[in-house]
Image (tube, rainbow, N blue to C red):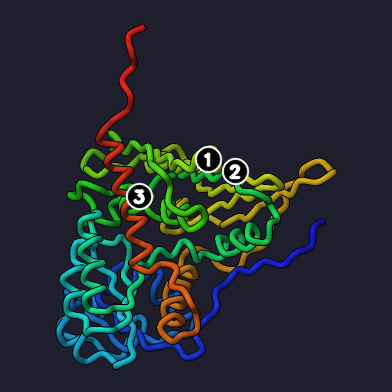
């Protein structure tokens, strides 16, 4: 059996900064605050437009201070605080315009409701000299950290194929704000996989895509099924396939990320997406080619996408601000490339395929 060690977690800041929440909704409840507790990060205070929601969150997670307004939050925040902005994409620019110059901000994805707003967000961040990152946290899931380490060590050789497949039954009713939006599936879900691919392969030369709704959820205007082909020439082949309406029981549900290389392969089951929000166990499997018959093995992984991945985005921002890291992986400068790729996917979907010529 091969013997090697893999990284599964991120480096933490030596002196974590206090966190001030702007928006205290479901994702903060399910992932932000649980992750910060694990990492030992302290939340100094928070604001939400729903004061009852804010009070519930403060009581449950022992948040010491609630602010009555956004203006009070940015005025009263500790001088070294990181602003943790978790609001719908369309609300981001107005909030960033009120954050004091030069401060650190972690912004929940997506980076606005499209590329035009992403450009506006980037412009505001530059003008206000904000050290800003987008919370593309899948990059920091323990199973992805392990896969990246395995690939960087050369254990599976040259990357030739990267595939993401989600055949799941997503309870869209948990996110009522999505229903009237013209863009949903790619912008709010598959964007994770688009960003993940970019983190391994860089930006593609082009994108072929189709996103559509499903008869079981016609009120979800922004689509619930997508196919995205990201073009990197001959290698690697990259596909992202999602079907959120697989309502036929758990037995045939699929939620995996697969890397195939010249010397081996990795397949990860991302159990969070299955039977959401309860999830199923993750699974990290790999195979290395050699003289013997290829044998798939399982590696034990500590932690999952929710909540542990959310440690990584905040930790990387804190470490960058304090000079403990030389790069900021999910900076707004990088994240806008993900938004541009998503925009290309929507443009491709709208343009349609090549008509069949007359026989």
Q: Position of residue 335 (x, y in %)?
A: 36, 62
Q: CA distance from mark 3 to mark 1?
A: 16 Å
Residue found at x 36% / y 6%: 359
Sequence-first disc among 3 and 1: 1
Q: Position of residue 278 (x, y in %)?
A: 45, 59
Helix, strand, or loop for circle 3? helix
Which residue is disc 2 drawn over? 160
Helix, strand, or loop for circle 1? strand
Residue found at x 37% / y 69%: 331
Helix, strand, or loop for circle 2? strand
Tell me if I can see residue 98 in this picture: yes
- Tag shown at residue 14: none
Camera-side residue of 80 and 108: 80
The part of the image, by quadrant, that contains residue 144 is bottom right
Tell me if mark 3 has few (under 14), some (14-19) or many (20+) residues whose alpha carbon lies within 10 angstroms of its own. Answer: many
Sequence-first disc among 3 and 2: 2
| Tag 3 and tag 1, C-beta contact below 8 Å | no
Q: Position of residue 155 (x, y in %)?
A: 70, 55
Which residue is disc 3 drawn over? 341
Camera-side residue of 210 and 128: 128
Sequence-first disc among 1 and 2: 2
Q: Is residue 6 left or right of residue 141?
A: right
Q: CA distance from mark 1 to mark 2?
A: 6 Å
Residue found at x 31% / y 91%: 64
- Whether 204 is drawn above or below 118: the answer is above
As drawn, which residue projects farthest toward the top? 359
Tell me if mark 1 has few (under 14), some (14-19) or many (20+) residues whose alpha carbon lies within 10 angstroms of its own. Answer: some
| Tag 1 and tag 2, C-beta contact below 8 Å | yes
Which residue is disc 1 drawn over? 237
- Whether 291 is drawn above or below 76: the answer is above
């Amino acid at each position: 059996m091969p013997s090697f060690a893999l990284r599964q977690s991120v480096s933490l800041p030596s002196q974590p900064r206090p966190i001030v929440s702007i928006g205290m909704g479901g994702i903060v409840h399910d992932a932000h605050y649980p992750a910060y507790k694990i990492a030992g990060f302290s939340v100094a205070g928070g604001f939400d437009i729903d004061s009852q929601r804010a009070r519930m969150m403060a009581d449950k997670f022992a948040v010491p201070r609630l602010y009555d307004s956004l203006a009070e939050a940015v005025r009263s925040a500790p001088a070294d605080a990181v602003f943790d902005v978790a609001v719908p994409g369309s609300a981001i620019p107005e909030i960033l315009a009120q954050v004091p110059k030069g401060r650190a901000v972690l912004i929940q994805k997506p980076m606005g409701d499209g590329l035009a707003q992403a450009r506006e967000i980037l412009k505001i961040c530059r003008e206000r000299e904000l050290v800003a990152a987008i919370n593309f946290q899948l990059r920091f899931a323990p199973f992805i950290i392990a896969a990246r380490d395995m690939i960087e060590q050369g254990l599976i050789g040259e990357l030739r194929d990267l595939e993401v497949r989600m055949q799941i039954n997503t309870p869209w009713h948990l996110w009522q704000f999505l229903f009237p939006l013209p863009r949903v599936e790619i912008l709010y879900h598959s964007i994770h996989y688009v960003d993940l691919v970019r983190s391994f392969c860089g930006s593609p030369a082009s994108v072929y895509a189709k996103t559509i709704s499903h008869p079981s959820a016609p009120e979800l205007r922004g689509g619930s099924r997508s196919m995205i082909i990201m073009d990197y020439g001959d290698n690697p082949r990259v596909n992202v396939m999602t079907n959120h309406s697989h309502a036929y029981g758990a037995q045939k549900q699929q939620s995996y990320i697969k890397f195939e290389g010249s010397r081996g392969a990795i397949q990860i089951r991302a159990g969070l997406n299955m039977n959401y929000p309860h999830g199923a166990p993750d699974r990290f499997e790999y195979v290395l080619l050699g003289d013997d018959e290829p044998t798939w093995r399982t590696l034990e992984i500590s932690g999952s996408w929710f909540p542990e991945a959310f440690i990584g985005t905040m930790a990387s921002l804190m470490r960058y601000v304090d000079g403990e890291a030389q790069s900021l992986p999910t900076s707004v400068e990088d994240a806008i490339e993900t938004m541009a790729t998503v925009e290309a996917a929507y443009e491709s979907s709208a343009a349609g395929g090549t008509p069949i010529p007359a026989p």
